[in-house]
Amino acid sequence: MTTGTGADPRPLTGEPVSLDLLNTRWTEDGEPVDLFAGAAGLTRVQGLAVWLESAGLADRFRADAATLVHLLTAREALARAVADPADASARALLDAVLEHGRIRITFTAEGAGERSEFADPTWGPAWIAVRGHLELSGTAADRIRACASPTCGLRFLDDSRDGNRRWCSTACGDRVEGPRHNARTRER
């Protein structure tokens, strides 16, 4: 995705918003990379602008320092909650983020609707990501996966029919399985 600040450098985009936020940290050539800490020569706030654009939130929220601080809080809480859903302190952090917003039920031409509201809009993207995780946890908790590549660690929602997807992308799977397949072929 291209924005006013440049292309999104992340290797995996388009996941549900909570996982997409987690995927702002990844590994490249064995080194950790963080979209919010200078990835691809972007400043922290430019990285936030890239993420807001990718997540479809750029038209609702500003990329500024306060929004970034709140989003980093949400990312850490989400990372801990996904790693260990039983972690009570992670759940408390998620709840603390959720305290900054609410849902207002509305009437629309199509029927019932919802609108999120924030006393402080800088909490909006963090709140939306945590609420997204709450929804995922309620409907597809067993489908939240980490890439099986030992050098990747990106998160994805396994939307395969059988629920047995192992890789964040075919490229990641090929990097791991390709050499294994070649070795087995040579042995035969």
Image (cartoon, helix red, strand yellow):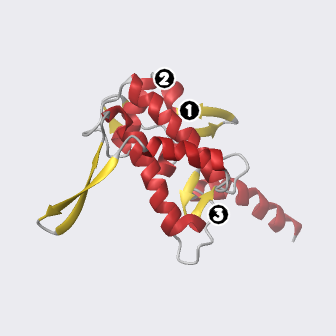
Q: Secondary structure at mark 1?
A: strand
Which residue type carries mark 1?
Answer: Asp
Residue at mark 3 to residue at mark 2: CA–CA distance: 31 Å
Q: Are marks 3 and 2 in contact (CB under 8 Å)?
A: no
Sequence order check, earlier mark of 3 and 2: 2
**Which residue is disc 2 drawn over?**
41
**Which residue is disc 3 drawn over?**
166
Residue at mark 2 to residue at mark 1: CA–CA distance: 11 Å
Choose top left, top right, bottom left or bottom right for residue 85: bottom right
State how many labels appear: 3
The residue located at (46%, 35%) in the rendering is 71
The residue located at (76%, 64%) in the rendering is 181
x then y, percent, for residue 42: 45, 24
In-front residue for pair 95/134: 95
Residue at mark 1 to residue at mark 3: CA–CA distance: 23 Å
Q: Are marks 1 and 3 in contact (CB under 8 Å)?
A: no
Sequence order check, earlier mark of 1 and 3: 1
